[in-house]
Image: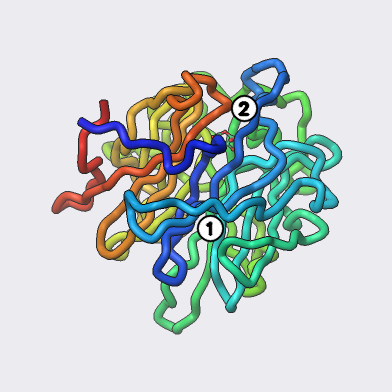
Amino acid sequence: MSNPKPLVTHIYTADPSAHVFNGRIYVYPSHDRETDIQFNDNGDQYDMVDYHVLSLDEPGGPVTDHGIALHMDDIPWVSKQLWAPDAAYRNGKYYLYFPARDKEGIFRIGVAVSDEPHGPFKPEPAPIPGSYSIDPAVLVDEPDASRKQKAYMYFGGIWGGQLQCWVEDPKTKQLVFDATKSGPQEPSGPGVLALGPRVAELNDDMLTFASPPREIQILDPETLQPLAADDHDRRFFEASWCHKYNGKYYFSYSTGDTHYIAYAVGDSPFGPFVYQGRILEPVVGWTTHHSIAEYKGRWWLFYHDSELSGGASHLRSVKMRELIYDENGKIHLKDPQN
Ligand code: FUB
């Protein structure tokens, strides 16, 4: 049994996306802050305005806070709520991907670029065309048989993340935003399928989608049918992450109102992914959000909880724990959770 300490305690941090760049661990978290905004199930209390980048040489070693890497005031299209980011390295540049509400209050995904992993990042003037909802996570895949390297963005979140608001117009077949579905709503009822996360291949510029985002299927391991909308213990809610282990794609995510980090495995970056189980049980605080990274042959789960703030759901702290894989490729925490 163990209870790791927060990586940093001088600021509140959440939604950690971890990567190893130049032999060092970099963590790209949300930067939580105090607010007098009324709490609600739309997540209005998560009212963040900037990003800091953290880095460390070794698990358990000192953590550097590199200061403000990107501020909302410098992003022309954003109105509020800089939520869970991720970063990627390609073509000699570092890319910071982030969701935020645009001037109409609709979540979009933006990108900002730097020569250094810790920033500062220069934002593009507009969100990624065709992007929507929250929680981008980018996998830069190994080169395929034709030696082409591809990158994929996973994203989406229901309730406050607005994924349920995007519905297909029957005439144009385009997705349109239905504001009446805003707030803590999602599909429900007998025979209704869960909303899936989305995946889009990125162009080589890392700034645009190569094709429209596709919905990902998460399948029941027995029936190989997509999970039902009312299967709240297993269905996707938010916090996508995709990593590779032994040639398989591991897609992990939060189940939201049931507070688990769950995962599913597939053979293609587009899925389908077959549900495998849980990585993390509920933590202190309402949200749960994570990433998974390999460092010097060991695997680490980065996640957050609200212990440091005494349980305030919008004031979270990033932690890390070691993961192990068993002989069947199943993920386990090395030390049991409390
Ligand atoms: O931090 C704001 C939101 O809370 C994130 O985008 C979600 O994943 C949840 O952690």
Q: Pointer 2: what residue?
A: 159
The residue shown at (50%, 28%) is: 287
Quarter of image, res 10: top right
Horizontal and vertical percent position of residue 148: 49, 80
> How many marks on residues?
2
Which amino acid type is shown beneath numbered disc 2?
Trp
Horizontal and vertical percent position of residue 173: 73, 48
The residue shown at (75%, 39%) is: 101
Q: Pointer 1: what residue?
A: 138
The residue shown at (48%, 58%) is: 26
Quarter of image, res 263: top left
What is the crowding at mark 1: few (fewer than 14 residues within 10 Å), some, or many (at least 20)? many
Q: In the image shown, does 12 or 268 lie closer to the viewer?
A: 12
Mark 1 vs mark 2, CA separation in Å? 22 Å
Asked whether the viewer can see residue 111, the reply is yes
Quadrant of image for the C terminus: top left
